[in-house]
Image (cartoon, rainbow, N blue to C red):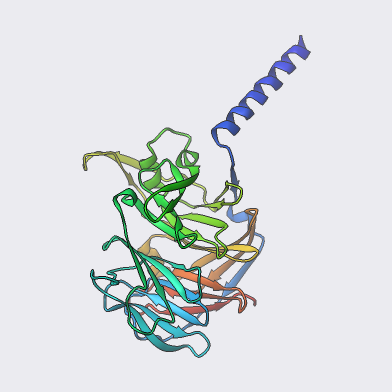
């Protein structure tokens, strides 16, 4: 009788395991807490004195240049010589005419030398610029957002004809499109993020984040703004690794119907991850853990370093509050935009100390 009971338990356990795998195929969750971080390094930043921009938002190292962008105050992009740390030129004409943009929502390196892409959610355009285009400040390629792509809020170009995106009306996290709006492939589902049953839109808003791609476009990541998670897609295998931590707390929210449809109102205004960078052998994530007000007051940030299996390797404490960042792995430097009310600028950190 005891042997029969044991057999029934094993069969039940096997059945539950199979059911779980069928519900969440190709999806692995890895949790880390603060006590799991093996190494902590404290870095002191070198704040630069670039005076051309007023409110910097994003930063990129592209070839031999540092690219800083802001939104619609004059020009959009400011280019600096990386070695000399001197101003070179500005790019991106503010406006809604052909080749013009009004703001830069996200900044991605392109596929060819000197190329970079931005999305303008006011003009509803995808725009490609080139650092070496000295004839004018306009985009060298501007693609209007079609009705088929009306729900797209994030994008990263994969090839000259396809891109990875996030969309408000999809049950999937990662969506691969062509520029005409044709859906090529999907990866991961928002239902992975909750044990309760909510609409895909509710889960999208609660778990909204920034979409980033690796240089070779094999890996794509979403880093949560209002929840501390990082989802990493391997496009070649279709598998998604979800790194949860260092708090691993589901955000609390109420559902409002004041706008005519269900919309989640999140109770906390704490910001978690502000950015992500895919390196050659590790992944860097910019972590905040404060509200915007607290960030300005405390003037500190952290960058977590993970391997591609999701293991936490290092924690870098930065002595500035950082809004966005990028990594130069050859120089072993973090190039950052400081989050400061009175004096925002570019800050450099060396992480090989």
Q: Residue at x 67, y 60 (%)?
A: 38
> 91 and 50: which one is in front?
91
Residue 23 in view in this figure: yes
Reply above or below: 202 against 318: above
Which quarter of the rendering shows the N terminus? top right
What residue is shown at x 40% (from left), y 48% (from top)? 182
* Residue at 55 percent of width and 72 percent of height: 327
**Residue 133 at x, y percent in the picture:** 40, 81
Residue 142, how many percent across, how many down? 34, 66
Q: Quadrant of the C terminus?
A: bottom right
Indicate left or right for 161 with 330 as reference: left
Q: Foreground residue, 48 or 157?
A: 157
Q: Quadrant of residue 352?
A: bottom right
Question: From what the image shows, is residue 45 above or below residue 121?
Answer: below
Q: From the top left corner, tell me how far across and down residue 291 is, in percent.
A: 38, 60
User: For the view shown, which residue lies furthest in the top direction?
Assistant: 1
Res. 273 visible in picture: no
In the figure, residue 197 lies in which quadrant? top left
């Amino acid at each position: 009788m005891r042997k029969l009971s044991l057999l029934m338990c094993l069969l039940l356990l096997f059945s539950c395991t199979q059911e779980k795998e069928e519900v969440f195929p190709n999806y692995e969750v890895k949790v880390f807490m603060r006590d799991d971080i093996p190494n902590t390094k404290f870095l002191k930043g070198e704040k630069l004195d670039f005076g051309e921009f007023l409110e910097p938002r994003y930063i990129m190292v592209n070839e031999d240049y540092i690219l800083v962008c802001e939104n619609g105050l004059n020009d959009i992009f400011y280019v600096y010589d990386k070695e000399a740390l001197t101003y070179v030129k500005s790019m991106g004409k503010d406006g809604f005419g052909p080749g013009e943009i009004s703001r830069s929502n996200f900044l991605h390196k392109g596929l060819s030398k000197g190329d970079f892409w931005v999305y303008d959610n006011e003009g509803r355009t995808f725009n490609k610029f080139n650092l070496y285009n000295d004839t004018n400040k306009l985009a060298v390629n501007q693609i209007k957002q079609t009705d088929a792509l009306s729900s797209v809020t994030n994008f990263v170009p994969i090839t000259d004809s396809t891109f990875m995106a996030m969309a408000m009306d999809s049950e999937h996290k990662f969506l691969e499109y062509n520029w005409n709006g044709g859906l090529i492939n999907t990866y991961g589902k928002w239902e992975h993020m909750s044990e309760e049953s909510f609409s895909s839109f509710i889960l999208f808003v609660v778990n909204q984040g920034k979409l980033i791609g690796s240089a070779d476009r094999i890996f794509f990541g979403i880093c949560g703004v209002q929840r501390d998670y990082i989802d990493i897609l391997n496009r070649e295998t279709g598998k998604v690794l979800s790194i949860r931590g260092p708090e691993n707390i589901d955000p609390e929210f109420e559902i409002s119907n004041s706008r005519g449809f269900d919309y989640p109102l999140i109770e906390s205004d704490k910001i978690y991850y502000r950015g992500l960078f895919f390196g050659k052998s590790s992944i860097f994530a910019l972590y905040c853990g404060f509200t915007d007000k607290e960030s300005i007051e405390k003037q500190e940030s952290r960058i977590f370093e993970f391997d591609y299996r999701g293991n936490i390797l290092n924690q870098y404490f930065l002595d500035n509050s950082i809004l966005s960042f990028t990594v130069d792995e050859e120089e072993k430097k973090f190039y950052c935009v400081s989050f400061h009310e009175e004096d925002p600028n570019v800050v450099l950190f060396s992480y090989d100390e």
